[in-house]
Amino acid sequence: MRKRTAVIAAVAVLAVGGGVAYAAWSSTGSGSGSVGSTTSVNSTITPVDGAGGLYPGKTVSFSVTINNPNGYPVKVTSISAGASEEVGGCAAATVTSVAVSNPAGTIATGESGTYVLQATMKTDASDACQGKAFSLPLTASLVSAA
C-alpha cells in the first residue's frame, strides 16, 4: 500500500508542478531597430602610362586606373569615349578612344583596377600633332558589387 500511495503522491506532485508551468503567462514585445545607409564617393581615373607611337591612322593601347574610395566593392559598368583637347596647334579630337561597356572585374573596397583602352589618331592629323602628349577626358560609371 505504501508503494501505491507514493506513486499517487508523485503523480499528484507532477500534475501540480506541470500545472504551474502551464499557467505561466506569456507576452510579446514590439518596437523598431535602426540602420542607415552610406553615401557613395566618386572614383577617379588616372593614367597608368602614356602610350607612344601614335601617327596618323595608328591605334595604340593605353592603361588607366580607376580607384574605389567607397566602403563597398564596385563594378565598372562602362568607360566613356574620349577625345583629345587642342594641343599646341594640333586640333581638338585628333586622338580619340572608344567607349568600353562592361569591362571585366570588381574593384574591392579601397583598391584600384587597371583597364586597357584603345586610342586612335585621325588619318588627317596635321604636322602640328608630332611629338605631342594627348589627354583624353574619360568618365567611368560604377555600381555597387556587394
Image (spheres, rainbow, N blue to C red):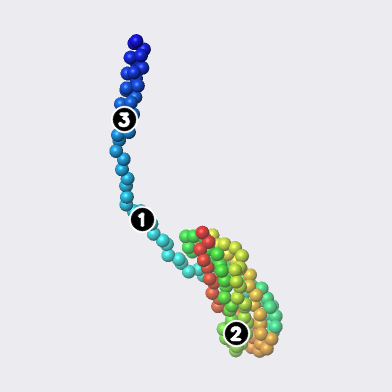
Say which mark, if any, is on residue 34: 1
Residue 87 is situated, as x and y percent measured from the top left of the image, at 58, 85
Nearest to N terminus: mark 2 or mark 1: 1
In this view, 2 is above or below 56? above
| Cα–Cα gap, marks 2 and 3 | 89 Å
- The image quadrant that residue 49 belongs to is bottom right
Location of mark 2 (residue):
93
Residue at 36% across, 55% down: 34
Whether residue 82 is visible to the viewer of this picture, yes or no, is: yes
Quadrant in the picture for the N terminus: top left
| Near-viewer residue (121 or 23) | 23
Residue at 54% across, 74% down: 139
Nearest to N terminus: mark 3 or mark 1: 3
Dot 1: what SS? loop
Amino acid type of the residue that numbered disc 1 sits on in the rendered structure: Ser
Say which mark, if any, is on residue 19: 3
